[in-house]
Amino acid sequence: MYSGEKLNAFRKHWNYTPNDAKELERFRTRADAVLRDTWGETIKPNDRLRQKFALISGTRYLSWEKSEYLYSSVSRTLEEEATLDDILEAVQFVLWTMEDLPNPRYLTELCQSLSKALDASPGIPVRLVLQNDTATLYPLGAKLLDEAVVDDNLVWLENYPEAAKPFQEALKIYLRKNPLEYRSMLDNLRMSVEQMIRSLLGNRKSLENQKEEFLRWLSTHDAHSQITNMFGDLLFGRFAIYQNDAVKHHEDKYTVAEVEFVLYWTGTILRFIQRVSEQQTSAVAKSS
């Protein structure tokens, strides 16, 4: 059976890597076929779903006379030379439209078909997560971290909205894979850490001026002394130097591997800080 894994093995055998434009076009064609079927079988004959789609997508409501897929904004988007962001947004609009149907199998079947299209498109760094009758497209990365950082839609950062916002923006930029935006992505990652620590310590200091107070916070929250030292060396040492050297002075010299490393390293840092704070809060609540 055909799969993205089989395709990757074939490409590796021939030492062949298709360009991004070709990968995007193939995925667009696959997604178009899936959404065409879903629209014709489920959305077209259902007036309520057409109204819901119009509201979600911000497009004109299609009456029965013009309810065919070709009249929809989804079709227009996928027929044009759309960016990956445009395509994913169109797909997500349809997924949200299919939620809350009396029979959940329609959404499940759509997700299965879209997952096959994504699996057949290994060059597209996206995956589809169906959880509690809600289907969402996410950037694809390391599975272990994605399960904590991505699948939960960053709910673990809900108490730190000022840190979550730049981190989410960094994830979006990473998904677009545009080297011209990598500097902005790295700026957002730095801002997310800075905002997280500001929230914890209740001040507005820059990241560079938080070292003493934050390391003291870690110590008082039962962090191992070597973990505290690690933060001192990496976060307030190497990370600050990297931001100064690479981000400020070498704006066009980033590799995908480099920015991915900084993304996941930052996610791990934020996750650890959140977990330490959460555990301490929970312990205090139990003792009172």
Image: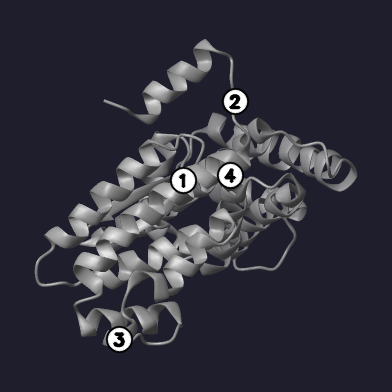
Residue occupied by mark 3 = 65
Image location of residue 223, percent across then percent down: 48, 40
When the figure is inspected, residue 8 is found, relative to residue 235, above or below; the finding is above
Image location of residue 120, percent across then percent down: 38, 36
Secondary structure under badge 1? helix
Q: Nearer the viewer, mark 2 or mark 3?
A: 3
| Rendered residue at 48%/60% (across/down) | 78
Residue occupied by mark 2 = 17
User: Which of the two discs, 3 and 4, labels the residue nearer the N terminus?
Assistant: 3
Could you tell me if residue 81 is visible in this image?
Answer: yes
Q: CA distance from mark 4 to mark 1?
A: 30 Å
Identity of the amino acid at label 4?
A: Thr
Q: Are marks 2 and 4 in contact (CB under 8 Å)?
A: no
User: Which of the two discs, 4 and 1, labels the residue nearer the N terminus?
Assistant: 1
Image location of residue 281, percent across then percent down: 37, 59
Secondary structure under badge 4? helix
Identity of the amino acid at label 2?
A: Thr
Q: CA distance from mark 1 to mark 3?
A: 30 Å
Is 183 on the left or on the right of 97, as rendered? right
> Which quadrant: the C terminus?
bottom left
When the figure is inspected, residue 186 is found, relative to residue 265, above or below; the finding is below
Residue occupied by mark 1 = 27
Identity of the amino acid at label 3?
A: Glu
10 Å crowding of disc 4: few (<14), some (14-19), many (20+): many
Residue occupied by mark 4 = 266
| Rendered residue at 66%/35% (across/down) | 256
